[in-house]
Structures are given as structure tokens and as C-alpha cells.
Image (cartoon, rainbow, N blue to C red):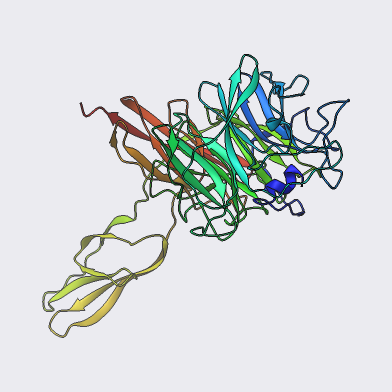
Amino acid sequence: MTCKEIISLFLFWGILTLNPLAGQDIKIQKLPISSPETDEFAPVVHDSTLYFVSNRRASLLVTYFNQNHEILYGIFNAPLRHDNTTGRANPVSGTKLLSLDAGPITFSNKGTMIIAAQPSEQLRFYRKKRHRTAPLVLYNIEKVGVDWQKVEKLQIEISGDISLGHPALSPDGKQLYFVAEMEDGYGATDIYVSQKVNNRWSQPQNIGPKVNTPGRELFPFIHPSGKLYFTSDGHKGIGNFDIYYIDLSNPNSDPVLLPAPINTSFNDFSCYIKQDNNHGFFASDRDGSDDIYAFSIPPFTCSELQKIEEDQFCFTFFENGPFKSDTLPYIYRWDFGDGHEAEGLEVDHCFPGPGQYHIQLNVIDTLLNEELFSVASYNLSLEPKKQIWFQAPDTIEIGQTLNLKASIQAFNPTHENTFFRWDFGTGDISIGAKISYKYQKPGRYKIICSTQIENKTVCFYQEIEVIDPQ
């Protein structure tokens, strides 16, 4: 069984046609380590080095195959330059655990330990034949000198022969996320989390139905901002497998689909996001094989920055030429066409929202409560202001969660799935229609939201005051 077959316990590949959303300014490039003859996926960056899984040959002298004569997957690394070009890819030195049927890995914060998934039984390797049926188990692998050599089974409270894969450590090392198929799951494979207590990992907890679906959730990645990035075919996305994130610090947040061209109608999966949230790596089979791509979100290029304005649908109505009569008691009655009326020569009225309203002013005999005649009758058309609409409080405290939701108002969106980008005035950028954010320093900030509308970039902002309660 190949590593791809091992991972197929958690992943099944499909072939779909490309139908990306155009007009987005996210830039992607295929890394030079990618090859049409081999698969590369599960990118991880540590210490200016890119680590990834591949079924390329690790050696010209000795090559390990499975029973189907397929080359086994292993962990490789390559120097990563600032322009996302890479040096020569080499197998990770040390234990054979990382070169024979290896799956995705995760690093400790200091980079002295790797957690990887491997079969639980004693492995028997042959040059062109290999047999294994054991489930996957997570292992600690520590660095000794320059090599990864010290291997120890991860102490985690779990019973039964359940395969655990796709490990992802939180930045502080206190939570371990991974993929498994258990009885309490919501679908084929779910994402679980275990807490580190006294150097042991607690009983895994399913992270819940907001992330896990009747489909397959895979490749978790924990960002320092608290976002959980993951791959799924169970949410409504662009293609089969797509990449999402959810803000774990906000219990009311929902998964956000990463926009095109990161996600396409092909399989897009296994991402690594840099600390700035604007750059990262992911894998995709859009070119026929599993390849690794880099992405970058360019800085804001707003030609015109406009402030969000609330629509004003309140007006003062008045009559300049009043009717006069010395014998009839009468009043002026306004009918605003929205189910409301008012009396007087001059009245104020607020309409419930945009729409078409028929305004009518009548003179009414107060004794008989009958209409004497109509003074005015006309149609009033109210339209909302063209803008990106979101609502933010005037003030917020440091560390308090700010929840924002963007929508297109009055514009004709260029795409069915509109891509929104947020700038919080701190250097942090987020993407998605619904986002959450926490300010860490007091001050006055400008929150900017932009998108592509009618073939141009439009940007709208609101200001917010961040205060320190202390």
C-alpha cells in the first residue's frame, strides 16, 4: 500500500473540470520542485526550508516500492528563497520513518520535534515488495544533531485500531489537531483536537459540526492568529476538495472559503499560511498531478477610498400653496404608499427602505371625513447608495472580538462568489465576507473593505476607536 493509499483512508481523489472565478488579484505560482511525473503536497515551512510529501525517488541506489510496484512516499525538503524559488529537493535525513510511507508532518515551535503518522506494527521493508495492514499511529521524532533519529510513539488517550493522520500542532504546542474516523464523527473523516496534559495527550474531542460534515475534512493547519485552515469536500465550495478557514477564537464564526485562484473546480488542499496571512502555500491537482503552489495577496490598490454612509430614507414633506376656506373645516392628509399616513401642511416621514412609493396629498373634510380633492400625486423612487456595506461599532476594547460582515449594496457583483478583502489598519489582512478580528493596541484605526465590482476595485471604510479598559 502506498502512502497515497494510506492517505486515501482520509482522502479520495477526483477529476473535475476547471471553472475558476476570474478577476481576482491573488497571485499564484507553481513551485519549481513540482513535477508532472510525481506528486508533491502537504507543504510546511520551517527555518527558510520547505518540507513536503512526495513519491519521487529518494536515491539512485535504493528505491522502496509497495506491492503494486509504486514508489513509496517520503518527506523531502528544499531551501526556500524570498521569491518562492527553491533549491534542490532532498529526502529528510535520519529515520526511515520519514522516507517510507510518510504522510504530512507538523513541527514544534522550536523546530526540534516532528509529529508524523506511520503504521503501528513493526515494518518489514523489501526492495520491490512490502506488506502492511496496520492502522496509522502518530509518532514524535526528535532531532539529534542534524538528523531526525529519536522516534517515540505519541502518548494519546485513544482506544481501538483507529488511524490518526494529518497532525497539526498549535503554535504554543498545547493542542494537537489531526484527522480520524471515529464513532462520534459526522462523516467519513473528521478533525479532532487533543490537549497536552502532563506530557500526555488527552482524549481527542471532535471539533464540531461547523467544521466537520458528512463529507471528508482533512489537512488541518493552525495559524498563529487562531484560524484553523482545513480541506473539505463537505462544504459548499468551488470544486471537490477546497480550502477553508474558521476563527476558533470566535464561537459564532463560520467557515470561510478561500477565493479563486487558490480554490478551483479541481482538488485544492493542504495549505500552509505564513504569519502575515498574505502569503502561503497549498497543493492542487489542477495541472494533472499533485503540485505545490505559492500564493500572495498584493497590497491594497484603491484608486478611490470612500466612507460608508447609512442610507437616509427620511424626508420632510410640505405644501406651499395651502387651500383656504372660511366655511369648511379641513385638514391635509398625506398617504406615503407604505401603509402610513400623516396629517399637516408639513410632516416628517421615514420610509422602511428602498423601493417605489406612491405619494398622495389630499384635503379632507373633517366633519364627514371625506376627501374634498387631491392636491398632489406622484411616485417616489428610493435607491440605496452604491457601496460595500458593513457595520462596525464606534469603539471597541483591546482583545474584544470584532465581527464584521460585508455585502454588496446596489452594485451588480462581477462574480457569483464575491471575494472581500479587509485591511484593519494594523498591517493585518483577512479575506472573506464574514470575518472576526481582535485589536491588540489602542488607537484610531480605519477598517477598509475592498472587492472587484463592475471590473474595477472598489474600497469603502469605517473608522473605529480601540480603547484600553485599564
Q: Is residue 222 visible?
A: no
Counting from the top left corner in percent of width and height, residue 309 is at: 38, 43
Depth check: give the residue in front, 318 or 164.
164
Q: Quadrant of the C terminus?
A: top left
**Residue drawn at x 47%, y 56% as measured from the top left:** 209
- Compared to residue 22, the image places residue 168 above or below, namely above
**Whole-percent x, y for residue 359 in the image:** 34, 68
Of the pair 383 and 6, the residue shown nearer to us: 6
278, above or below 327, in the image = above
Whether residue 108 can be seen here: yes
Say if 295 sits above or below 194 in the image: above
The quadrant holding residue 47 is top right
Q: Is residue 152 left or right of residue 387?
A: right
Looking at the picture, how far across and down is residue 228, in whole percent?
Answer: 50, 41
Task: Find residue 243 and report its image quarter.
Answer: top right
Q: Is residue 28 left or right of residue 222?
A: right
Image coordinates of residue 280 in percent, x first then y, are: 61, 31
- Residue 340 figure quarter: bottom left
Please state which of residues 353 and 429 is positioned toward the viewer in this rendering: 429
Relative horizontal placement of residue 282, taking residue 438 as reference (left or right)? right
Q: Is residue 155 above or below residue 95?
A: below
Residue shown at 34%/55% (left/top)? 313
Of all residues, the one furthest to the bottom in this rendering is: 368
- How many numbered badges does the structure rendering display? 0
